[in-house]
Every structure is written in structure tokens, then in C-alpha cells.
Image (cartoon, coloured by chain):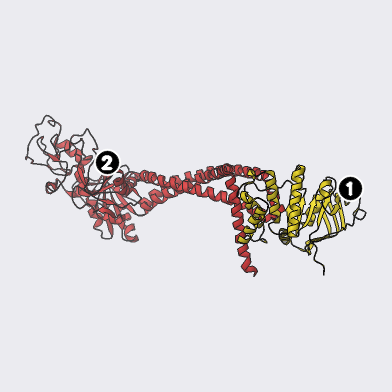
Chain colours: A red, B yellow
Amino acid sequence: MTTRTTPRRGHQALGHALYLAMRSLAAAPWRTAVLVGGLAVALFLPLVTERAATRLESALLARAEASPILLGPEGDEFDLVMSALYFRGRVGRPVPWRLVDGVAARGDVLAIPLHVRHTAGGAPVVGTTPEYFDARRLTVAEGRRPALLGEAIVGAAVARAAGLEPGDRLRSDAANLYNLAGAYPLLLEIVGVLDPSYGPDDDALFVDVTTAWALDGLFHGHDEVTEGAVPESPVTEGFVTEDTVAEDTVAEDTVAEDTVAENTLTEDTVAESTFADDVTEASAALFLFTEIDASNRAGFHMHGEQAEAPLDAVLVLPDDRRAHDQLLGDAALGVLLPAGTADAPSIRAVRPPLVVRSLLEIVLRLRAMLRVVFLAISLSTAAFIGLVLTLSLRLRRDELRLLRRLGAGRARIAGLVGVELALIAALALGLALAAALAVTERLDLLLLAASG
Amino acid sequence: MTATPALRVENLRFAYRADGAATFRLALDAWTVARGERWALHGPSGCGKSTVLDLVAGVLRPGVGVELTGRIELDGHDLATLSESARRALRLRRVGFVFQDFPLIEYLDVLDNVLLPYRLHSALRLDDGVRRRARDLLTRLGLGEVAVRLPAALSQGERQRVAIARALVAEPSLVLADEPTAGLDPARGRAVLDLLHELADERELSLVVVTHDPAVRARFEHQLDVGALSSTEVAESAESADSAEVRA
């Protein structure tokens, strides 16, 4: 009998305590608001910081863990990771395509080229191969993946921000307005939109690597080229030479350096070049295509060897641990890059998880410091709330005395006060959580943008 | 077989102590309040009238600075043999308290104030029957229209009636009223007493009222002079303390 009635009585007592506590809180809305607000702020700050730091860590680490090895030129490993994983910044010298061929020939790894040298509408344009989408588990929300030269698929955030959808066109950004010998911006055709992946891929456009080379000016289309013609145009005369073109396209970046009119051809400057030692012919009368469509796609071509075409990095996904370790060993021995026709930088292998973890140590140190600050804030807030509650209970002394004389035991009165405090704490926690969620949702976008 | 009295006190000895010495003593050898009887406790200020109410209701118990011996029975239950919780339960069921100044909980409306004892102890179960009874009681006291008002919106007379309704809602057999007319003008004081007597008649209640007003005292057939039972002499021992046998 006792076992049946005791829980019911407990529930009844809790129900009565809740009812009285709610009436008491509702009767003093300002006092309640001050208590809830003060406590909510004290909870909100550490909550949002912890959550944001955790999100930043997990966002950065998840992508790094999914990118076991990056191959790139000797240089700063942070630059390489930031460029290849988060499309932020760029590496110095490019690595040649033959590195992809050489690594892929091992048979126990997947080698994915990454070319991240251009932007369109402010978003990075990533030149890669279809394997990239599978490796990153990127799925298509609308349309399809790029299959032809000049086609692009856009990340979810870019599509949303720019209002892009399949069938739209977007011109690549001019990288340098003053290099007339460079390549021109190209009009890219949007053929698809990716599902949100809540990472840097949402903020980028993806094209086939040959389209990226077209943006470099290495893969291009134009009208008639006259063999051995010497440019006579006053615009280009004495400006574009074999040497300067070769330098521009190989040692430096071969990028479009002018704003372009809306027509699909430009007649200002033409640079017919290679990135090796081929002959370069230039003519003011030569028109470069700034738009790739069905009528001119077949005419696009590359001068020189694809093996020497530039990439920023190669993402390597080994089949197993053995393949992973062997690749790192070979990279250390400097035997990854097959012989080619042009000079290439030394290749280094970088392990992004290690690089990102070392980067996160700074975040962890900052977080530890913030924890101390928030502990101090929480203690002072707790002292303030304790003072308010003590004063409040003193003001309510007559009320509590009446409850006792009416029959409430000390435990019941303590329970009533406790439930009231619990309600305040629950309201404050709910408010703090809701605010923290709202803020971190916004912060997520900023963090992803920052990390991307 | 005679009915169990609402209250019986035997050989009660009570003292407040400070620094090992008694500062207040009260001795009551025998006192019985039969069912339906009405008593007035009188005496000068500070003589322990309210203390007697707290003692017989089981609110005041032996503890630090408080000495208490003797037997107090409420409805036949010896308070000394009951646990604190059982004593509170008995008080809630059998005793209605009307406090001086008629205090109410300001954030509860009239109906909730009346039902408040039901929210303070598991011995009383709040159900629809109790709510209906509380509304009927409020209607009987002329408060049916103000049941959802907060105390701040009530007149002094309405507050008094709400406090009386709260004392009666659990259908007690004994009502203890502590100076219910103190601070009221004569007309209001008379009205409160009239109401208490009416309700006692209707419900066959035993009524014990503390008062120092001779006019109020005169309306009760039984009287207990608490001033004659208590002393504040420090030197007296418990054995030699004044005691009195009181029987109507």
C-alpha cells in the first residue's frame, strides 16, 4: 500500500510546489526577469564559447581527417593545407600534373588534383576531377556535375548567396587588371548546385581541371592563328613577346588580366603561348574566346604537354595504412614525381590532421583562458543571485512563517523554495541555450567561411 | 460512552529558557474542550495566550530553549506520541487556525488562498470535491464573486473572511483564533465574532479564541485566564510554579 501511495503523493507534492512557484514567479515579473536574465547571461557566455570552439575544432578536424595526405610544393605546410582543404590563400609554385599520374600509377592510392587559383563572383573556383565529389561525399541537389569544358557546379552557400541555379552563367573574376598578356575571364555555365555539406565546399565553385587551365589561359580557344605572324597592333606592339609570354604562363600564373566586354571575343590582346618551350605567336587580330559554348568548345586546345600543366596540390587517399606509410616514405625520399620536360619544385607530403591539430592548440589555449574568465564571471553572478535570493527570502519571511503555521514542514518549505529556484534556473538555462544555439548557428557560417 | 473531546490537556508544564534559566513559565494541570464548546483565552499582553494556542495545536514542541512536559490530546491523539509529520497532518485535518491580522499569500487568488493547506501537506488531498466545498464556503461567506481576485484587491473585511474560510476548508473539529478582533473597529470585530459563532453553530465546531478584550470575552460561555497560569519569574522552580486546574 505504501509503495503505491508514496510516489503518487510525491508527484502531488511536486505538482503543488510547481503551481505555487509559478504563481510566485508570475506575481513578481521584474524580480523574476532580473534573476532569469542575470543567470542566463552567466550561462550563455561559456555555453556559446564552448560550443563555438567545439564546432570550430570539429569542423576543421573532420575535414583534415578526411584528407590524410596532401602533396604540394616545398613551402609552408599551413599555406598548403589552407589552400587545398579550405580554399583560402594559395601556395607558391605549382606542381605539375605528372605528379598525379605518378602517384596514381602506384595503384594503391587515389590521387585527386586540386587547382585553386581563380575566383568567380568572389568564390573560389576549384579545378579537380569527379573523384573529388565522391571523396568529399558531395551530392548534387539540382542539375548535374560538370562534364564539359566551361561547366561548373556551385556549392550550396554560393548558390544561395548569388541566387545561382542550373542554366545561369557566371564570369570568373579578373585576377590582375594590369597584365594584358594574361588570360581573360571566362563565362562559366552553371550546370548544377551541390547539397549543403556545411564546410568549405559550400562556398566554392567546382570545375573540371581543364576548365581551370582554361581560366589560366593555357587551355584556350580562338579564331585563326597566322603561323609566324608578327603583331602590329599599336596596343600590343613591342609588349607581348615570346619571352614574356613564356614567363607569364609558366613561372607565374597565367591569368586573365583585363575586364572583358560582354561579347564572347576580345580583340585587345592575344597571347598564344605554351608553358614549356613552344613557339608563341601573337597577333592583335587574334580573338580569344571568353565564353565556352557548343559552337567553340571543340576548338579549345592546349599548347604544350598536359603533364606539365599546373596544380596547387594533390589530395591523396591511400587504400590502407601500408599505402599511406609507403607514400610518405617515398615523398621523403623525393621519388614521387616522375621525370618531365620542365623544372618542377621539390614535392613534399603534408598530413593535414597533424597540421590542423597544431593549429587547434592555439584555440585550446584560448579556450582554457576563457574558461577561467567565465568561471570568475559565473562566481560573481552566483554571488549576486545569492544576494538577491537572500534578500528576497528575507522579504518573504512572513509568507514562509504563515506556510509553516498552516502545516508545511521545513522540508516542504525548502522544497517550495527549491522548486522556485529550479524554475528560475531552468528558464535561464533554456534562454541561454536558445540564445547560444541561435548565435552559434550564425557563428557556424562565419567559422566555416573563416575556415574555408 | 462519552464523545472524545476536541482537546484535552493534562499536567502541562512549559518554559522558555535562556542561558540555563527559565524566562517564561506556563503550567496547566487540566483543561478539556468538549465538542461544540466555545472558549475565550484571556489575560494581559505577553502572558502566553498565543503560546497556549501553539502548544495545543502542536506547533510549539520541545527543543532548544523550549521545555515541555505533560499530555496534550487532539481528538484523542496524544501529540507526544506522533511524529512531526503525523502531528502536522493531524493539525491540518482537525484544527483550523485563524491568525491575528488575517495574513494571506498575496500572489495567490482568493480560492487558492483558501485551498492553500491542501498544497502544503500530503495528508490533505486536493480534488474536485474539495474545490467545490471551498467555493461553497466562499459563497456562504459572501465571497463567491471575488474568488479569482488577488488579496490586494480585497477590502479588510473580505480578507478576514478569506482567512476564516481557509481555517474551515478542511472541515476541522476545532478552530483556534488568535486575537481575531485585534486592530478592528468594534463593528468589524463584532461581525467577525458573529461569523465565527454562526459557523461554529452550523458545523458543531469547538472554538477557542484568544482575546484581551472584555467585550469579546463576554460572548463566550467558557473562559481561561492564561495570565493566572503563567509567570515570568526566573527564580521559581517548576515544582513551585503556579498552576491551575481549569474546568468549566
Residue B27: quarter of image: bottom right
Q: Is residue A342 left or right of residue A324?
A: left
Label 2 sits on a secondary structure element that is loop
Residue type, numbered disc 1: Val
For mark 2, does the 10 Å Cα neighbourhood hold few (<14), some (14 to 19), or many (20 or more) residues?
some
Residue identifier under label 2: A121
Q: Relative to residue A32, is residue B33 depicted above or below?
A: below
Q: Are marks 2 and 1 on the same chain?
A: no
Residue identifier under label 1: B234
Report the residue at 23% width, 40% height from top.
A253
* Quarter of the rendering occupied by the N terminus of chain B: bottom right
Residue B38: quarter of image: bottom right
* Quarter of the rendering occupied by the C terminus of chain B: bottom right
Q: Relative to residue B130, is residue A48 depicted above or below?
A: above
Q: Is residue A168 left or right of residue B123?
A: left
Label 1 sits on a secondary structure element that is loop
Residue B137, image x, y percentages: 67, 55
Judged from this view, the residue extending furthest toward the right is: B240
Q: Is residue A102 left or right of residue A398?
A: left
Is residue B62 visible from the viewing direction of this image?
Answer: no
Report the residue at 38% width, 43% height from top.
A446
Mark 2–mark 1 Cα distance, whole angstroms, equals 97 Å
Report the residue at 8% width, 35% height from top.
A230
Residue A39, image x, y percentages: 55, 45
Host chain of mark 1:
B
Pick the residue in front: B88 or A312: B88
Residue type, numbered disc 2: Gly
Q: Is residue A239 left or right of residue B61?
A: left
